[in-house]
C-alpha cells in the first residue's frame, strides 16, 4: 500500500439487549467504526462490502454506497466515525469486509476491515 493510501480501521461492538428478542432468534448488535486517514492524500469512502456470518455459519453479503447514507471525505490526519448495526439469528457471529475508497486522482482502492466478533457478552469466557 502506498504512503498516500494508508487508511486504518478500528471497530468496537456492542450487544443491544433492549432491541433484541432472544426467544424469537433476534440478536441486535451495534458497531462503531473509526476510519483514520494516515496517508498524504484526501480519500473518499465510496462503497462498503460486508460478509456477515451467524453462529450457525449462515452468511449474508451486504453491498452499498458509502456508510450510513454518507460518502465521507477524509483529509490526511483526519478520521471519520460512525455507528451502525446488524441483526443476527444467533447470539454470536462475525463480520468482515472492505471499503472501496477513492483517492484525489480518482483511483479506487480497497481498505480491508478484518473480521470482528458480534457476541452477547455473557457468552464470552
Image: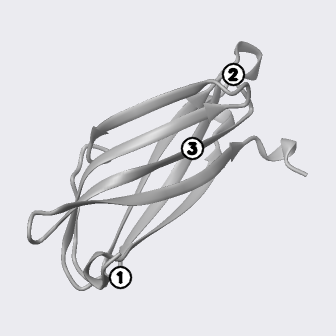
Does residue 91 sit above or below 37 in this rendering? above
Residue found 44% across the figure and 65% down from its top:
34
Q: Residue 9, how many percent across, how many down?
A: 46, 66
Residue furthest to the left in view is 105
Neighbour tally class for label 2: few under 14, some 14-19, many 20 plus, Cα within 10 Å? few
Does residue 26 sit above or below 69 in this rendering? above
Task: Out of 30 and 109, give the one closest to the viewer.
Answer: 109
Q: Mark 1 or mark 2: which comes first in sequence?
A: 2
Q: Is residue 73 left or right of residue 85?
A: left
Q: Secondary structure at mark 2?
A: loop
Labelled disc at residue 95: 3
Q: Is residue 59 left or right of residue 36?
A: right
Labelled disc at residue 27: none
Discs 1, 2 touching: Cβ within 8 Å: no
- The residue labelled by disc 1 is 38
Residue 40, located in which quarter of the rendered image? bottom left
Q: Is residue 65 left or right of residue 24?
A: left
- The residue labelled by disc 2 is 21
Residue found 77% across the figure and 16% down from its top:
23
Q: Mark 1 or mark 3: which comes first in sequence?
A: 1
Q: Residue 77, how many percent across, how many down?
A: 31, 84
Does residue 86 sit above or below 23 in this rendering? below
Between label 3 and label 2, give the one nearer the viewer. 3
Q: Residue 80, how many percent across, how many down?
A: 34, 66
Q: Mark 3 or mark 2: which comes first in sequence?
A: 2
Task: Out of 46 and 89, give the one closest to the viewer.
Answer: 46
Q: Residue 46, how many percent across, how many down?
A: 22, 52
Measured Cα–Cα span from mark 1 to mark 3: 24 Å
Between label 1 and label 2, give the one nearer the viewer. 1
Amino acid at each position: 500500500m502506498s504512503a498516500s493510501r494508508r487508511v486504518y480501521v478500528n471497530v468496537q461492538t456492542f450487544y443491544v439487549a433492549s432491541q433484541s428478542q432472544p426467544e424469537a432468534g433476534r440478536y441486535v448488535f451495534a458497531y462503531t467504526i473509526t476510519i483514520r486517514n494516515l496517508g498524504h492524500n484526501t480519500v473518499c469512502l465510496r462503497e462498503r462490502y460486508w460478509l456477515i456470518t451467524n453462529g450457525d455459519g449462515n452468511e449474508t453479503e451486504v453491498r452499498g454506497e458509502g456508510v450510513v447514507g454518507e460518502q465521507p471525505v477524509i483529509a490526511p490526519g483526519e478520521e471519520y466515525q460512525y455507528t451502525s448495526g446488524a441483526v443476527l439469528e444467533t447470539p454470536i457471529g462475525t463480520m468482515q469486509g472492505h471499503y472501496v475508497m477513492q483517492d484525489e486522482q480518482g483511483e479506487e482502492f480497497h481498505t480491508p476491515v478484518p473480521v470482528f466478533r458480534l457476541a452477547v457478552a455473557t457468552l464470552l469466557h
